[in-house]
Every structure is written in structure tokens, then in C-alpha cells.
Image (cartoon, rainbow, N blue to C red):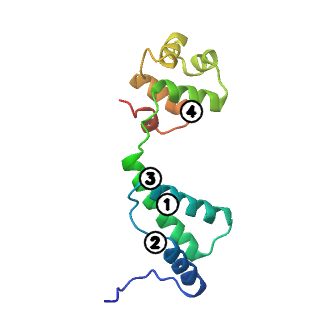
């Protein structure tokens, strides 16, 4: 039965897509070995540089399948408050003293978070999100 859809690949784009599907079918990833092969296929496509619409569509679909498998089988735990703060400070190139001065929080509070003795307070989250220009949700992941 034919489907009525706005999305269609035509010509060379369709040919490249179908060639890729025949070489490595788009199907749910079922094992780590399957995952490794899917990653090799993606690496080969990315190494090409420029891709036509067919190859780009295939790569997007394969990436989604890989992402789904990784989310289920190799989930990465959220960064701790300490790790997140250290990363943001390193990326911005600020010291504890400078951060304390810039956002008007005691240096001891920043030190306690960095050492893992204390988690972010709501007040810290608001100030840090504004200072580092990140969404509050990035810092509130562990609340």
C-alpha cells in the first residue's frame, strides 16, 4: 500500500540512500557488536565530508538508532554539582576568588561545592546560571 507523504527522495539522493540501506539496514540496535558496526558506518559517512540528501537522511536515521541504544544500555549519569561547576569555571577561565567576587557568594560556599561537601542551593543556581549564561536546568539536574 502506498503512503501519501510529503517526504520523498528522488534521483541520486534516493539511490545513495538505498545503497546505504542495502549495505547496512536501518534497524534497532540489538547488541554492543551491532552498535560498534553502526558507529563504523557513521564514521565512514562523516569522513566523506559533504553528503547528498540521501546519505544525510540515512546518517540521521542511523544516529537516532545508535542514540536510542546508547540511552538504554550505556546511559551517562548527570555530572555532579562539583564537576559541573569546575567545568564552567575552567571554560570561562575564572578562579574561585573571581567567581565569588563576581556573583557575591562566599568563597567558602564555592569551595564546599567544588570539594563535593555541598550541593548547589537554589540561590547559587540562579546566580551561576546568569553568570555562566546557561539554562537553570543545566545546574538543577541533581535537585
Looking at the image, residue 82 sits to the left or right of residue 72; the answer is right
- Look at the numbered discs 1 and 2 and tell me whether their residues touch, using CB distance below 8 Å: no
Are dots 2 and 4 in contact, CB under 8 Å? no
Asked which secondary structure carries label 1, the reply is helix
**Dot in front, 3 or 1:** 3
Kindly report the distance in space between the C-alpha atoms of the residues bearing marks 2 and 3. 16 Å
**Residue at image coords 45%, 28%:** 80
Residue 23 lies left or right of residue 91; in this view the side is left
The residue closer to the viewer here, 107 or 131, is: 107
Q: Badge 3 is on which residue?
A: 32
Residue in the image at 46% along x and 37% along y: 138
Q: Which residue is mark 4?
A: 132
> Can you tell which of label 2 and label 4 is closer to the viewer?
2
Distance between mark 2 and mark 4 Cα atoms? 43 Å
Question: Of the residues under marks 3 and 4, which one precedes in the sequence?
Answer: 3
Q: Nearer the viewer, residue 124 or 17?
A: 17
**Image quarter in which the C terminus is found:** top left
Return the residue nearer the eye: 53 or 143: 53
Q: How far apart are labels 3 and 1 at the CA level?
A: 15 Å
User: Which residue is identified by label 1?
Assistant: 63
**Image quarter (top left, top right, bottom left or bottom right) of the N terminus:** bottom left
Amino acid at each position: 500500500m502506498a503512503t501519501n507523504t510529503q517526504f520523498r527522495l528522488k534521483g541520486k539522493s534516493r539511490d545513495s540512500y538505498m545503497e546505504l540501506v542495502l549495505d547496512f539496514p536501518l534497524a534497532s540496535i540489538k547488541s554492543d557488536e551491532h552498535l560498534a558496526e553502526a558507529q563504523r558506518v557513521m564514521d565512514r559517512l562523516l569522513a566523506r565530508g559533504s553528503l547528498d540528501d540521501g546519505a544525510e537522511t540515512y546518517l540521521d536515521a542511523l544516529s537516532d538508532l545508535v542514540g536510542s541504544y546508547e540511552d538504554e544500555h550505556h546511559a551517562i549519569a548527570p555530572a555532579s554539582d562539583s564537576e559541573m561547576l569546575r567545568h564552567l569555571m575552567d571554560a570561562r577561565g575564572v578562579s574561585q576568588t573571581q567567581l565569588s567576587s563576581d556573583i557575591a557568594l562566599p568563597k567558602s560556599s564555592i569551595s564546599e561545592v567544588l570539594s563535593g561537601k555541598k550541593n548547589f542551593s537554589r540561590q547559587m543556581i540562579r546566580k551561576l546560571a546568569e553568570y555562566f549564561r546557561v539554562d537553570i536546568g543545566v545546574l538543577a539536574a541533581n535537585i
